[in-house]
Structure formats: structure tokens, C-alpha cells
């Protein structure tokens, strides 16, 4: 699976104002729920928070990959946001986060979830890819930068 199979333009937001990790996760949950009618934003937000309690999804380099399994989706789904100002995310390198790529997978798709998560983390390890995401000036440019990366997930 490629990044373009996870995203739609409606689930990509550039330069979002978020004052905290919690607010960034609310925005991700709301963004996903707006484009996928079967997903409840509050329930998804609670799942993201529950996952963060297990350990931060901040993987370093200013990147976080909030993720969870959810019954309401039939395949892997993603949302991507960049923040105007980085926020503390308790990341493994203690650096604040300004790029968040959320991923949802069906409850029963544990193997797919782990495979996609590992591939997405690998893609985000590319300094060039991270910079292209950060250089985007609007939602459309961010979407194009994300799907232009040919990493297969």
C-alpha cells in the first residue's frame, strides 16, 4: 500500500493551530470523522489518548504517528497535519512535534497495522521527505508532497 492509498485531500491539513498534544489529537480525530461518516470524533479521540497513555507515538525528528485499531473502517485510513508551532509530544527524542500522520486500521488487521506502521515510520525517517512536508504552504501542497513519496506501505 502506498501513502496515497491512506490519504484523501480532505484528511490533510497544513499549518494547523494547536496549543498542545491533546488539541492536535482532537484535530486529527475531527478531521477523520468529517470525511468518514461511520467514525465518531469523540470516540476516536479517546482511542488516540488511550494509545498515547501506553507510550508516546512521537517517533523523533518532530514526527508523531498516532494510530489505533477501529471497527468502523474496512481498510487502513490516514490523516496528515502539520502544525504552525511544534508541541510537546513526549517524543522519544524529547523534541516537539510539528508533523502528525494518524493511521487507523480495522480491529482484525493487526498484521497490516504493524506493517503499515513500520513502513510509515521508515518513510518519515527520510530527512528529505520530512522537509518536503514542512515546506508545504497549504493543504493541497502538503497532500501532493505526501503522496509524491513513493514508499510502499
Image (spheres, rainbow, N blue to C red):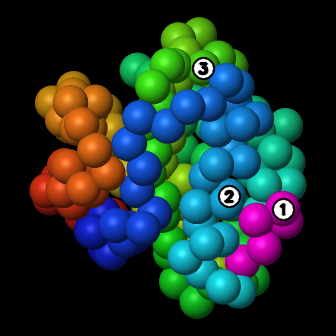
Disc 2 and disc 1: Cα gap in Å? 7 Å
Can residue 111 be seen?
no
In percent of width and height, residue 82 lies at 43, 37
Checking the image for residue 87, the label placed there is 3
Task: Indicate left or right for 94 with 143 as reference.
Answer: right
Q: Residue at x 49, y 37 (%)?
A: 16
- Give the mark, 3 or 2, whose residue is nearer the N terminus: 2
Observer-nearest of 81 and 119: 81
Q: How many marks?
A: 3
Question: Dividing the image into 4 quarters, which one contains the N terminus?
Answer: bottom left
Left or right position of 63 against 52: left
Residue 60: mark in rendering: none
Give the percent coordinates (x, y) of residue 15: 41, 35
**Label 2: how many residues lie within 10 Å, few (<14), some (14-19) or many (20+)?**
many
Work out how far the residue at label 3 is from the one at label 2, CA to CA, in angstroms: 17 Å
Is there a contact, CB below 8 Å, between mark 2 and mark 1? yes
Q: Residues within 10 Å of mark 1 (few under 14, many from 20)?
A: few
Using the numbered discs, state the Cα–Cα distance from disc 3 to disc 1 in whole angstroms: 21 Å
**Label 2 or label 1, whichever comes before in sequence order:** 2
Residue at image x 18%, y 56%?
144
Decide: is 62 above or below 119.
Answer: above
Q: Which residue is mark 2?
A: 29
Q: Are marks 3 and 2 in contact (CB under 8 Å)?
A: no
**Label 1: which secondary element:** helix
Q: Is residue 49 left or right of residue 67?
A: right
Residue 46 lies, with reference to residue 10, above or below; the image says above
Name the element at disc 2: helix
Q: Earlier in the sequence, mark 3 or mark 1?
A: 1
Which residue is label 1 attached to?
42
- Spot occupied by residue 53 in the image (x, y as percentages of width and height): 84, 37
Q: Which residues are magenta?
A: 39-43
Amino acid at each position: 500500500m502506498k501513502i496515497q492509498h491512506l490519504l484523501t485531500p480532505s484528511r490533510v491539513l497544513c499549518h494547523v493551530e494547536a496549543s498542545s498534544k491533546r488539541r492536535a489529537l482532537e484535530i486529527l480525530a475531527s478531521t477523520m470523522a468529517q470525511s468518514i461518516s461511520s467514525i465518531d470524533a469523540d470516540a476516536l479521540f479517546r482511542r488516540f489518548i488511550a494509545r498515547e497513555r501506553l507510550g508516546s507515538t512521537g517517533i523523533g525528528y518532530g514526527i508523531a504517528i498516532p494510530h489505533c485499531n477501529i471497527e468502523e473502517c474496512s481498510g487502513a485510513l490516514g490523516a496528515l497535519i502539520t502544525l504552525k508551532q511544534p508541541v510537546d509530544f513526549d517524543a522519544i527524542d524529547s523534541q516537539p512535534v510539528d508533523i502528525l500522520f494518524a493511521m487507523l486500521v480495522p480491529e482484525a488487521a493487526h498484521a497490516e497495522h504493524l506493517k503499515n506502521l513500520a513502513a510509515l515510520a521508515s518513510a518519515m525517517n527520510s530527512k528529505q521527505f520530512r522537509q518536503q512536508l514542512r515546506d508545504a504552504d497549504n493543504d493541497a501542497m502538503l497532500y501532493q508532497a505526501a503522496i509524491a513519496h513513493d514508499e510502499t506501505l
